Image (cartoon, rainbow, N blue to C red):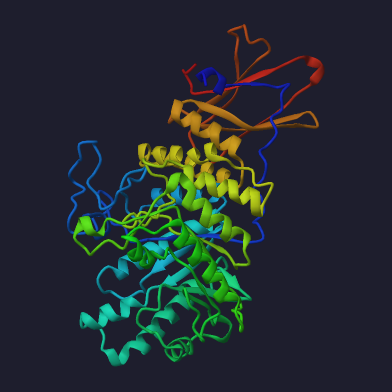
């Protein structure tokens, strides 16, 4: 786009607004999210999930990338899960992809190992999912209780009581939030396992401390507990050991069919959750953490299509995308240098096909999130541009992508722009955004684009508030042109 095209506005052409966000389909699409990444320069060190005590992100590879614990490289590079710019980028990608919410892998609130840091990052994510209008849910990792016992943080005899306190914390900080994901008016709680509390009686004792209206709809992995509503499936990598460590298409399909059969067998589960994933390629053996859990090929997107089509069309309560960002296991929907936006584009296409035919967004729209992220980095200390980028965020989540694109183009070009034009009852109105400099903005008008006789009709001082222009126009007076410019600019 030529710079001048950003500045000029023909009165005779009124640009219509973009299509609003489509309503959620009949089945929510949630994505499993890992909030455990710690990275320089946001934090003082690189966390275990980028290093696994083997890799050194301070070292650049021959390809110029940081040396991280993954076969795949995030499009924005390795990041910190507490970084506001990262969280904004993630939730915008989700919104534009047709994802309705997140399931956060949660370790509780204890100040043990990295659990407190994960809780801090979980709370930070909730702030941004709220802003983006996304649902929120927790997947409690009860393996943490075993680790705390092994580390001497708690006694084995106190395990149930400690877990009860953890769920009371979840009730106070998450379950009561109006955006928390619910089923039959119960907060949905996932559990990756169970790995420690394997008896239903333990979970009943743990839940006994919760308020009557906050008793969770409890979903465990693969099999339902009596204390629960149902279960969710997960990449069945244990089956790969029967096939030389490679999960075959036949094995995967048999597992998916068998899971649904379990859910339907009498007595049928009240509900179940189906998961979809693009691949499985862990780095554990290379890092020396453990033997590999197995391998499932991406199959040129075939693995995702196989699992996602079933999850979207069966009788499951919701779809769980596995995962947003488990880079250590390679089950990554977040854009990477290797796959770009392809997997999120598939989610968009399948949502449109199976859940919401009027879902309006496509792969190219996803780039808005990256453009905003890059500008957040470039103008982190500029209050004028930061306020404008805040307005870009709100326009994206409100479905005003045309306006957001113009604003981003203006900041990228270091030019002010005109957007959100309307003309009614002889009154012209528009907003001024894009690059807002410390010298302010002028609105000028002319009756002929070939003349240089532009007249300044309004001057705005630098401000973080929205700049709105209105002007009375008379159609019989002929065309009038407007442009926004920085004083002394083009």
Horizontal side of residue 416 vs 76, given as left or right:
right
In this view of the protein, which residue sits in the foreground, 402 or 70? 70
Residue 114 at x, y percent in the picture: 27, 68
In this view of the protein, which residue sits in the foreground, 301 or 33? 301
Residue plotted at (63% across, 59% down): 313
On screen, 97 above or below 207? above
What is the tally of numbered marks visible in this picture?
0
On screen, 336 above or below 181? above
In this view of the protein, which residue sits in the foreground, 482 or 374? 374
In this view of the protein, which residue sits in the foreground, 110 or 9? 110
Can residue 220 be spotted in the picture? yes
Residue plotted at (20% across, 83% down): 152
Residue 411 at x, y percent in the picture: 46, 31
Give the quarter of the image for residue 289: bottom left
Residue plotted at (59% across, 61% down): 28
Can residue 464 be spotted in the picture? no
On screen, 136 above or below 347? below
Horizontal side of residue 50 vs 11, given as left or right:
left
Residue 469 at x, y percent in the picture: 64, 31
Residue 144 at x, y percent in the picture: 31, 76
Residue plotted at (40% across, 48% down): 85
């Amino acid at each position: 786009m030529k710079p001048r095209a950003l500045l000029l506005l023909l009165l005779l052409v009124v640009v219509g607004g973009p299509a609003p966000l489509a309503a959620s389909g009949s089945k929510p699409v949630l994505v499993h999210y890992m909030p455990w990444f710690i990275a320089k320069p946001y934090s003082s060190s690189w966390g275990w999930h980028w290093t696994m005590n083997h890799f050194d992100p301070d070292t650049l590879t021959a390809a110029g990338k940081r040396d991280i614990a993954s076969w795949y490289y995030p499009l924005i590079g390795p990041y910190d899960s507490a970084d506001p710019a990262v969280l904004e980028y993630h939730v915008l990608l989700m919104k534009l992809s047709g994802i309705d919410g997140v399931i956060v892998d949660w370790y509780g609130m204890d100040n043990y190992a990295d659990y407190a840091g994960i809780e801090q990052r979980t709370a930070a994510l909730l702030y941004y999912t709220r802003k983006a209008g996304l649902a929120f849910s927790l997947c409690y990792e009860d393996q943490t209780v075993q680790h705390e016992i092994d580390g001497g943080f708690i006694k084995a005899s106190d395990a149930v009581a400690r877990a009860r306190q953890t769920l009371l914390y979840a009730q106070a900080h998450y379950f009561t939030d109006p955006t928390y994901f619910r089923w039959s008016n119960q907060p949905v709680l996932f559990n990756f396992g169970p790995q420690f509390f394997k008896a239903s009686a333990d979970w009943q004792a743990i839940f006994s401390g919760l308020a009557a209206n906050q008793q969770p709809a409890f979903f465990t992995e693969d099999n339902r507990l009596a204390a629960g509503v149902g279960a969710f499936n997960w990449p069945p990598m244990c089956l790969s050991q029967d096939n030389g460590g490679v999960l075959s298409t036949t094995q995967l399909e048999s597992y998916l069919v068998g899971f649904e059969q379990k859910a339907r067998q009498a007595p049928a589960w009240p509900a179940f959750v189906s998961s979809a994933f693009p691949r499985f390629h862990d780095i554990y053996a290379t890092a020396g953490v453990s033997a590999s859990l197995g391998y499932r090929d991406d199959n040129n997107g075939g693995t995702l299509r196989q699992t996602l089509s079933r999850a979207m069309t069966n009788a499951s309560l919701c779809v769980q995308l596995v995962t947003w960002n488990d880079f250590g296991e390679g089950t990554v929907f977040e854009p990477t240098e290797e796959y770009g936006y392809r997997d999120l584009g598939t989610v968009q296409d399948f949502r449109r096909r199976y859940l919401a035919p009027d879902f309006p967004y496509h792969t190219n729209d996803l780039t808005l999130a990256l453009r905003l992220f890059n500008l957040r980095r470039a103008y982190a200390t500029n209050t004028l541009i930061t306020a404008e980028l805040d307005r870009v965020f709100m326009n994206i989540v409100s479905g005003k992508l045309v306006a957001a694109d113009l604003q981003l183009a203006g900041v990228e070009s270091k030019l002010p722009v005109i957007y959100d034009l309307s003309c009614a009852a002889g009154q012209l109105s528009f907003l001024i955004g894009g690059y807002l400099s410390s010298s302010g903005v002028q609105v000028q008008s002319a009756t002929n684009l070939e003349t240089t006789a532009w007249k300044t009709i309004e001057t705005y001082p630098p401000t973080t508030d929205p700049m709105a222009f209105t002007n009375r126009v008379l159609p019989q007076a002929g065309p009038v042109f407007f442009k926004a410019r920085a004083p002394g600019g083009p």
